[in-house]
Amino acid sequence: MEDWIVARPGLLGGKPCIKGTRISVELVLDLLASGATREQILEAYPQLPAEGLSAALRYAARSLKNEVVWDVKIPA
């Protein structure tokens, strides 16, 4: 996965992207959340290899794996 995902300050503001493209992990997640299938994404972005798409999903999952969510009560 590390071979597929890169983050550089000069590329999309440092967002994690799929190597060799300007396609961010965020864009991939947005597309999937809006209902696009993997096949539709790969068809819409021919420069995106299937392995890169899979790596983006693994990267996102790994990034959230150890995320801690705090239940913060805000006084009224």
Image (cartoon, rainbow, N blue to C red):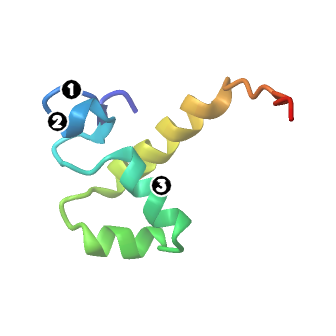
Measured Cα–Cα span from mark 2 to mark 1: 5 Å
Give SS at disc 3.
helix
Instruction: Give the quarter of the image for residue 12.
Output: top left
Other residues around mark 1 within 10 Å, as few (<14) / some (14–19) / many (≥20): few
- Is there CB contact under 8 Å for labels 2 and 1? yes
Quickly name the residue at label 3.
29
Q: Amino acid at mark 2?
A: Leu
Q: Quadrant of the C terminus?
A: top right
Left or right: 21 in relation to 33? left
Give SS at disc 2.
loop
In the image, what residue occupies the spot 36% across and 69% down? Answer: 41
Q: Which label belongs to residue 8?
A: 1
Measured Cα–Cα span from mark 1 to mark 3: 19 Å
Quickly name the residue at label 2.
11
Count how many numbered circles sit on residues in the image. 3
Other residues around mark 3 within 10 Å, as few (<14) / some (14–19) / many (≥20): some
Q: Amino acid at mark 3?
A: Leu
Left or right: 74 in relation to 14? right
Give SS at disc 1.
loop
Instruction: Give the quarter of the image for residue 7.
Output: top left
The relative height of residue 41 versus residue 21 in the rendered view (above or below) is: below
